[in-house]
Image: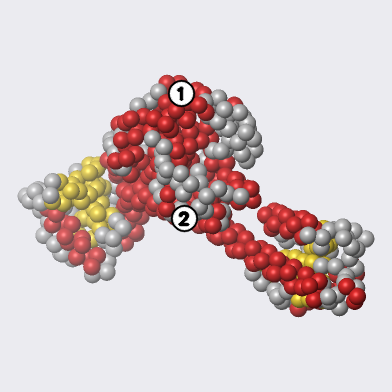
Amino acid sequence: MLMTTDNKLSFIQSKLLKDFGQDIAALGANLVVYDARLNSLFNFDGGKFISDYDAAAACAKHVLKSRSDKIQMFGEFEQMLCVNLTAGDEVTAVVVLDCGQLLPSEADKSEINVSNYMRQILNMFVNAFSQEHKSQQQIEMVSGELSQTYEELMLLYKMSANMKVTQSDLNYLQMACDSLTELVKVEGIAVFLEKRIGETKKLVLTAGTGLIAIDHKQSNMHEILFERLLAVLRAGSDALLDSEVDAPFKYEWFGRVRNIIAVPLHGKDKVIGMMVATNRLDKADFDSTDAKFFNSVANECAVFIENENLFRELKKLLIGSLRALTNSIDAKDQYTRGHSERVAFISKWIADHYAQITGRMTTEQIQKIYLTGLLHDIGKIGVPESVLGKQGKLTDAEYEQMKAHPAIGAGILSEIQQMADIVPGVLCHHEWYNGKGYPKGLMDDDIPLAGKIVMIADSFDSMTSKRTYRDALRLEDAISEIERGLGSQFDPKIGSIFINSDINKLWEILQGGEVEDENYSGDSFSEYGTIAIGALLK
């Protein structure tokens, strides 16, 4: 019969267990890891003695049944330690640590304490395993929130795209009026919008078809009509309808008005305009069916007008969320505050100059490189704060944890379809041109262009910023370091483009903060992120 396992361990959890098992074996003890069905997953032999694996399995079965996450001790000298490893309320594995069978003649007090020593080690591992699970949950939560934000944004964007939001308000509203007159036979239809003119807001004729004869004697008759419509809305109706078919006019009209309908264009929190039609040609009056149809068309017009404003606000919200996330990561170390924003700006600077010299980069690609720079360190959310903020040199184990952040960041962003073009640069921003970088050891043309650019931007900002282990380099020293790294750490062509740009101007910008940049039509740099987000939604 085929034996199946119930391995619920993640890759990182499996690696933690394997590393721990090797450490225990190096101390001369034996370690067995079982899944939730008591199938053996890993077995590490310290080579000092032979464990009783039947007894180990029996211990694992007892502990698994107890569902306890406390370490339990078995054997004559309590030399066999057993504990459940849990993820939330679920047992993912059972660990049995065998300290060795001590003979009665050898069981002096110091030897018996071996099990207590091992118990402390095992307890520390259980705590570390639990902390890793919490970190994994946090990463999944961030991924889910970002993914959900993008899905909501894309839905609104698609609605806007289907309405051809690239055209002007005038063209869209005029198309609505023209289309409406093909279905509803009237003398005239018009759309009025409230617009700011100087210091005041006025109702302005924005689009129309045919003849609207409401201004025969009073030039402000459209303003009067708007006030009448607002009063009708406050009374609970959804349209102003008036005629003298069944009764006298409710209101005084001038000119050739025989019947009239006015419906609102609703904005986010107020009425932003109205659609008006006068004089039905194919029947005596406007009715409730007309009111519903006109309201539907007016709502579409209002959605068109408001949707672009809402889309712009949502882009601001999204870039603000991304900045808040990267700033929270930067803030884990007082010396890296603002690092991601600066890397994003420097990456855009390099990409702009690369595009000017080679002509092989579009505005959209530059915007994506900016976002890659902004998000390049997002994977540090999975690196312990004790490592990120450590004073002094990292140990080999800590350095391995730090080196995992590009892969963690790429993993987070890969869950979001619209981030597909950002992932390669985030994953490869520590790859060296000569192949001695990480995580994959890529070299030369195998490294994505975004990764090469962000590598230079990241290195330059790190060199010119104070760190826990050194002071900031002077500008000229940082440039010299990059020159020395051309062909080894840095792509020589891209590095040369950066070095030959006006770095003194770049330095002034970085020192001065917000700046006006001619490369994106005079928008302040603080707004550029909102513009760049649009590159992900095309």
Count neighbours of disc 1 (C-alpha within 10 A) and say few if under 14, some if 14 to 19, many if 20 or more. Answer: some
Residue 37 seen: no
Check disc 1 and report its element: helix, strand or loop. helix
Q: Is residue 35 above or below residue 159?
A: below
> Which x, y percent locates residue 118?
74, 68
Pick whichever, 105 or 26, lies toward us.
Answer: 105
Residue 3 visible (yes or no): yes
What residue is pinned by disc 1? 496
Type of amino acid at the residue the image marks with label 2: Lys
Left or right: where 474 falls relative to 488: left
Q: What's the CA distance linking mark 2 and mark 1?
A: 33 Å
Q: Position of residue 459 (x, y in %)?
A: 48, 37
Residue 439 point in image, percent of width and height: 62, 40
Residue at 20 percent of width and 55 percent of height:
259
| Residue at 93% in and 60% down | 1
The tag on residue 332 is 2
Q: Is residue 255 left or right of residue 187?
A: left
Q: Residues within 10 Å of mark 2 (few under 14, many from 20)?
A: some
**Precedes in sequence: disc 2 or disc 1:** 2
Q: Residue at x 85, y 68 (%)?
A: 100
**Residue drawn at (24%, 65%) of the image:** 233
Question: Residue 510 placed where, x, y %?
Answer: 34, 39
Residue at the extreme left: 217
95 is higher (above) or lower (below) than 256: below
**Residue 10, image quadrant:** bottom right
